[in-house]
Image (cartoon, helix red, strand yellow):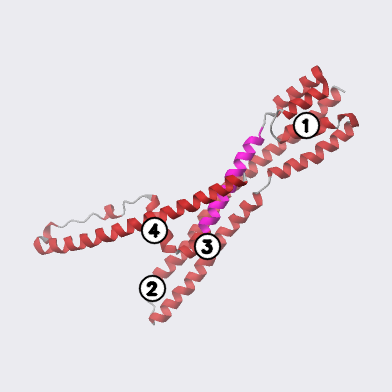
Amino acid sequence: MKKLIALLAVFGFLTFGIANNAFAQDSQKADKTTEQTVDSTQATQEVAPAELTSDPDEAENHGLHYVLKDKFIQGGAVWMTPVLICLILGLAFVIERIFYLNLSSVNSKKLLNKVEDAIKTGGIEKAKEVCRDTKGPLAAVFYQGLDRYDEGLDSVEKALTSYGGVQMANLETNMTWISLFIALSPSLGFLGTVIGMVQAFDDIERAGDISPTIVAGGMKTALLTTVFGLISAMILQVFYNYLLTKIDSIVNDMEDATISFMDILVKNK
């Protein structure tokens, strides 16, 4: 899983770099096209000004990726890049947890039926073999209980409780990192906004006049970091709540299955 997180992080950085290069190329092409358009427009105005028509919707007809790249550049790479890194790393941990939790999910009723049939037909050793061949934390907990069956049901119950706590803790691994990136993304955005506002006031001081262009441009650039930070935090928060719901479902199922498992051992003692 650590290799998966590293690969996802590298992939994210590469994607970000390629996107910036592509945007730079698009910007250069756009500048050349603009110069050619200005020249051709001036020539056309000299020849036939009445024939000129403009389509404002055509200039705004860009894809979402173009808009995001444009706003990213406007916000400043110094403060937008850390927010993007938080989003990429947070999503990497989210993907790792989704894979792990999906592999940890198991049909508890089906497993209990297999264990009970194995105890009736082949005893504890066959039931342990069934648990070894089944993946997931629930089967591992059952195996620890069966391994202490000869010591008595009290030892089995203690083993289920202690090892069940270990498995539940494993389910919550890396969740603290996701919550960290949820809190860090808007914090970095606010920090970029505050520094951007300070720079905007510096520009006003240097200009010696409160120009609407200077104020509006500086504030827009500063607030973009907060916008991206909040968007990043909201995306991670949705996945974080989904993972918490998934973990609670698995834990509740494990607790119910453990009680049924103890009933099976008592009944077949």
Of mark 4 and mark 3, the one earlier in the sequence is 4
Left/right placement of residue 31 relative to residue 203 reads left
- How far, Cα to Cα, is label 1 from label 3? 47 Å
- How far, Cα to Cα, is label 1 from label 2? 68 Å
Residue located beneath label 3 in the image = 189
Of mark 2 and mark 3, the one earlier in the sequence is 3
Magenta stretch: includes residue 39: no
Task: Assess whether mark 3 and mark 4 are in contact (beta carbons under 8 angstroms).
Answer: no
In magenta, the rendered stretch is 83-105
Amino acid beneath label 1 = Phe
At x 82%, y 21%, the residue is 123
- How far, Cα to Cα, is label 2 from label 3? 21 Å
Nearer to us in this view, 172 or 131: 131
SS class, disc 3: helix
Q: Main secondary structure of the magenta part?
A: helix
Nearer the viewer's eye, disc 4 or disc 3? 4
Residue located beneath label 4 in the image = 70
Q: Residue 267: in sight, yes or no? A: yes
Name the residue furthest top.
121
Q: Is residue 149 above or below residue 80?
A: above
At x 18%, y 56%, the residue is 53
